[in-house]
Image (spheres, rainbow, N blue to C red):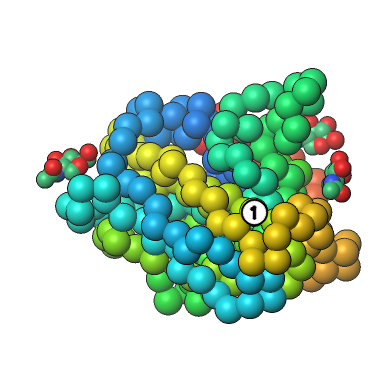
Amino acid sequence: MQLIQAVSLLSFAALSLAFPNGAPRCKITESIISAGHKIPQGSLGLVMQLPASYTPGGPAIPITVTAANGTAVSFQGMLAYLTPNPVQDSSLTAVPVGTPNVPFAGGAPQHVGTFTNIAAQNLRPQTAAICSNQNVTNDNAASTITHAQPLTGQTPFTVMWTPPAANVGPVTVNMVISSGSSRTPWQIIPSGLIQSTAGPGNPNASAPSSATVTTAATAATASTTAATTTTTTTKGRKGRKAKKAKKAKTA
Ligand SMILES: *[C@@H]1O[C@H](CO)[C@@H](O)[C@H](O)[C@H]1NC(C)=O
Ligand SMILES: *[C@@H]1O[C@H](CO)[C@@H](O)[C@H](O)[C@H]1NC(C)=O
Ligand SMILES: *[C@@H]1O[C@H](CO)[C@@H](O)[C@H](O)[C@H]1NC(C)=O
């Protein structure tokens, strides 16, 4: 028993990333990441390269993270999502939920569109329960993505994002990149805005019906069961809350 524990601890350490099978959160919150990584945010010199616009119901578009000075940056971890809101989500998650006169205080409630073809890049949909615990509604299982295992990512790095069928107006790309284990540099990349070719739109237009939410949640649970070591947190609504609370302290 003790030997097994020691071995699994060793292999965990060897993986080096604090959360080797994905970020434990559905929103990017600087204070929480700082605590989890035991190091304040530092710049990796990363920026986004984005198309000017998307077409509702149209083709997937590339979202690229690259180093501002062109030097390749290697990284292991990622959390990314788009919000139908022209504000970087980490500036909203820095404000407590319910703060008066701050729309979306605590972070935008909806993540829109779908990242496409992510398994080939060792990325996966964020676990549905992690998102619902933070009051996030995903349009699709892969509206919010994270690493399925420590990445051997190197910039420039491109993920493809398929817009929602409904026009949700301008969308903000939110992304945090971690270079490696605890106490290694990480950066919330300055967000970028992508306009809609169909104009301002209704930011709520893509909100899925509750039936869709349930389907997406089931799909996400099934697709992550094999890949994640935290499957117990996706099962059963009861034990989950306590575990989440415990996890949040170490996140
Ligand atoms: C590029 O930027 C990174 C991060 O700021 C820095 O560490 C690196 O030295 C820079 N490289 C050059 C060639 O300026
Ligand atoms: C989720 O929503 C409930 C009900 O509005 C609220 O009490 C709770 O604080 C919210 N939790 C988070 C993490 O936003
Ligand atoms: C979108 O939904 C929010 C929350 O339900 C609401 O306050 C807001 O007025 C809605 N916006 C539009 C344009 O319908």
Work out whether residue 8 or residue 205 is closer to the camera in this orientation and state it.
Answer: 205
Residue at x 81%, y 60% (from the top left corner): 205
- Which quadrant of the frame does ligand 2 lie within? top right
Q: Where residue 183 sits in the image (x, y, percent)? A: 31, 33
> Is disc 1 placed on a helix, strand or loop?
loop
| Residue farthest along the right direction in this orientation | 210
Q: Pointer 1: residues within 10 angstroms few (<14), some, or many (20+)? A: many
Residue 168 image-quadrant placement? bottom right
Q: Is residue 139 above or below residue 136?
A: below
Viewer-side residue, 106 vs 133: 106
- Compared with residue 44, is residue 224 higher up or lower down, i.e. above or below? below
Question: Is residue 223 in view from this perspective?
Answer: no
User: What residue lies at 56% left-to-right and 63% top-to-bottom?
Assistant: 53
Which residue is nearer to you in this view: 196 or 159?
196
Residue 90 at x, y percent in the picture = 55, 36
* Residue 58 appears left or right of 156: right
The quadrant holding residue 49 is bottom left
Residue 80 coordinates in the image, percent (x, y)? 52, 53
Kind of residue at disc 1: Pro
**Label 1 CB less than 8 angstroms from ligand 3:** no
Residue at 51% across / 71% down in the picture? 61
Q: Using residue 91 as the reference point, say whether residue 236 is left or right of it.
A: right
Left or right for 109, reference 214: left
Q: Which residue is mark 1?
A: 170
Query: Residue at horizontal 28%, vertical 41%?
Result: 44
